[in-house]
Image (cartoon, rainbow, N blue to C red):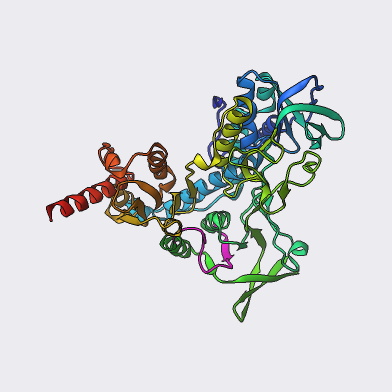
Amino acid sequence: MINSSRPCGALGQTSAEDARAEAQELLANVRPPDWRNPQPSGIYDLIILGAGPAGLVAARGAATLGRKVALIERNLLGGNCLNAGCVPSKALIRTSRLYARMREARELGVGEADELRADAVAAMQRIRRLQARLSRSDSACRLRERGVDLYFGTGAFISPSQLRVDDAALLTFKKALVATGARPASPAIPGLEEAGYWTNETIFNLDATPARLLVIGGGPLGCELAQAFCRLGSQVTIAQDDPMFLPGEERDAAQILAESMANDGVHTYLNTAVVAVRTQGKEKIIELMNEDNKMTVRADEILTGIGRVPNVSGLGLEAAQVEYDTVSGIRVNDFLQTTNPRIYAAGDVCLEHKFAHMADATARIVLHNALLRGRRRLSALTVPWCTYTDPEIAHVGLYVREARQQSIPVETLTVLMHDVDRAVTDGDESGFLKIHLRDGTDKILGATIVARRAGEMINELSLAITAGIGLRKLGQVVHAYPTQSLAVKMAADAYHRKRLSAVAR
């Protein structure tokens, strides 16, 4: 359970002393300066490399099972999610959404504030305050109290059953889990390294929003932060080398996002590559190429968001007889075993979909298969995901194109958010719900939601797919009125009406 008893100051009211105290608390939780690694003794039932979401879930679970477990982290507990990903980005997005909403005050029948401005310093302090608070549940001391042997340092295999920490402590294991995560991909653009740039791992160290920001990449990270910084006052330009944002999502979903970002003031270049960067004083000059057209953009800062690559180097995977490559990561089977059957992998280091909840889910599979002799499969998971722009874009299951590739006939039911009463009263009418059914049945194959609360709404459909609940049964569920999730019941009602109409004919 997270201890939330410590009071948190209001946004904009955190003193310098409070900020220092929160930074010290965070460090004490995720990498205590005075930490001493334990002395290895005996054979570990499970050794885990990496203390991000997957590693922490596995360590807690193994300790709960009464197993002898070691957890090795070379940087900070919590991994990317706590320190540079989900937590800081969603905290910043919350601030930017509030600021954007306040600008809509007159539309909602509220007088506009006389002095409305974003406070980047306060926003960043709030991020660190939340990180400190959330880090308590899996702090170094809490892990030790739970019976986890926690080592800070670089772990590397020296054989199929042994590894060393910082070329010192020798650890022997029955089973091991590699959960070292991924890091931002570095674009090969001439002059970028010399000019300097930010990634998601460094951008939250800013103490002010840049006046002009260029974002390279129109995937989830690029779109989320481009919109957030624009709403907080930056002049933002985003360059995407694909013809649309979020190239893996449905086209109409990406189009709605493009329109929303344009309304916020984001300058967009699609089908455009960044070909060179140079500096002129403190200014960065970026050269763009769209087909045969060259353009120049000037910015104060550059943020890259072109994807993530697995952390596989320096782990001694060859000595452990674990196959991998630097692009797709560690090779695993459906049970998440590597080519060394006593070593498993979970999370971003081995998965295509690099989500914190996917890391959590795969760590649970490893716990079951490695320690309880189970046979749980990666392919059995139903995994939703969400891009936390405004509106949010969430998806679960198959896309229509994927169903067609598998020769599965598809029927799609669509509900527009402007027909959902709660979306209308909230002023959140942009977006839709699409549910893809196997044609002729009510079996749900997949769904896409574009809405302000899409990330919350998608879980109902994820549950339905996982449990084999058809759309007809979902239609029998009484939904609270008025809620945006009533869109699901409206889709079920449309399905029912269509079937009744066919019977009547």
Relative to 256, is 211 on the left or the right?
right
Camera-side residue: 499 or 26?
499
Residue 195 visible from this viewpoint: yes
- Overall secondary structure of the magenta section: loop
Whether the magenta-drawn stretch holds residue 274 is answered as no
> Where residue 169 appears, x then y in whole percent?
84, 28
Camera-side residue: 221 or 111?
221
Camera-side residue: 80 or 384?
384
Q: Which residues are magenta?
A: 233-250
Quadrant of residue 347 within the rendered picture: top right
> Residue placed at 63% from the left, 25% from the top?
371
Relative to 55, is 316 on the left or the right?
right
Decide: is 257 above or below 346. below
Relative to 230, is 427 on the left or the right?
left
Whether the magenta-drawn stretch holds residue 240 is answered as yes
Q: Considering the image in quadrants, where does the C terminus appear?
A: bottom left
> Where residue 76 appears, x then y in whole percent?
71, 37
Q: Considering the image in quadrants, where does the N terminus appear?
A: top right
Residue 428 visible from this viewpoint: no
> Where residue 146 appears, x then y in whole percent?
65, 20
> Residue placed at 81% from the left, 35% from the top?
159
